[in-house]
Image (cartoon, rainbow, N blue to C red):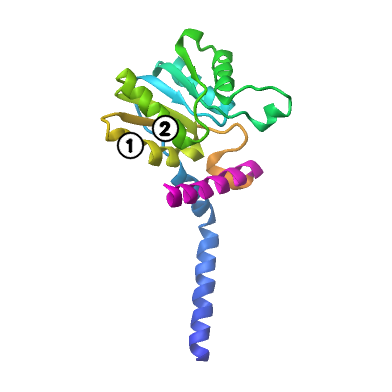
């Protein structure tokens, strides 16, 4: 019995030492799993999901100026709590719209829809819009840590209707995704996204 306990203790210590030695790779792996970033040449429509107008608006504008997308569609019916504290009823779709204009995207290339309070709601609206406009391929822009869930929500549902979806991740302006554990915002963002992964897995 004593010999078995010693072997178990030594094995446990060896595993802990190995995990410590590989800690950076393991932590990077947590982030890597969440990030989906598809390559594409040129797609007419890009849909900018609500939730982080600054980062996602910047990414959308970048793709526009690179000539990779032509028309940018902003969605989102929520009002940010920070905006509410100022007594302003500006929707997230409005904030993304403003960020695109700030980055030099012409008004004529922006479409705004105050629709959707969740990823699922936005995906349902975007699918119906694509069917109405006969859009057969699109880009969906969200924060990098959200892209795995975006892929799970959008891809199969759209593929069933013959629509190709490309995912583009917007990097955070508050932390570096690849070293998320070095920043409080990164810790919170990664933790929240894994909780949402579990929530979507159970509910949908």
Q: Position of residue 102 (x, y in %)?
A: 59, 14
Magenta region = 183-204
Element under disc 1: helix
Residue picked out by circle 1: 157
Element under disc 2: helix
- Residue at image point 45% right, 49% down: 203
Q: Position of residue 64 (x, y in %)?
A: 45, 17
Can residue 55 be spotted in the picture? yes
The label on residue 55 is none
Q: Residue furthest right?
A: 86
Instruction: State the residue in front, 123 or 136.
Output: 123
In magenta stretch: residue 15: no
Instruction: State the residue in front, 145 or 198.
Output: 198
The residues bearing labels 2 and 1 have C-alpha atoms spaced at a distance of: 9 Å
Residue picked out by circle 2: 123
> Is residue 43 toward the left or the right of residue 142 in the image?
left
Q: Could you tell me if the residues under marks 2 and 1 are in contact, i.e. CB atoms within 8 Å? A: yes
């Amino acid at each position: 019995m004593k010999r078995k306990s010693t072997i178990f203790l030594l094995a446990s210590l060896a595993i802990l030492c190995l995990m410590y030695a590989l800690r950076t790779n393991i932590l990077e792996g947590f982030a890597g799993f969440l990030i989906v970033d598809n390559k594409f040449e040129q797609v007419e429509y890009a849909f900018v999901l609500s939730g982080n107008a600054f980062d996602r608006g910047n990414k959308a504008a970048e793709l526009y100026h690179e000539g990779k997308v032509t028309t940018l569609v902003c969605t989102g019916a929520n009002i940010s709590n920070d905006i509410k504290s100022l007594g302003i009823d500006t929707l997230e779709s409005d904030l993304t719209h403003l960020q695109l204009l700030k980055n030099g995207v012409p008004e004529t290339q922006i479409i705004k829809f105050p629709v959707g309070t969740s990823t699922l709601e936005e995906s349902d609206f975007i699918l119906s819009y694509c069917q109405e406009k006969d859009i057969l391929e699109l880009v969906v822009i969200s924060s990098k840590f959200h892209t795995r869930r975006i892929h799970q929500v959008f891809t199969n549902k759209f593929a069933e209707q013959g629509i190709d979806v490309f995912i583009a991740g917007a990097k955070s302006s508050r932390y570096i995704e690849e070293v998320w554990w070095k920043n409080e915002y990164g810790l919170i963002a990664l933790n929240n996204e894994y909780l949402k992964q579990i929530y979507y897995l159970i509910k949908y």
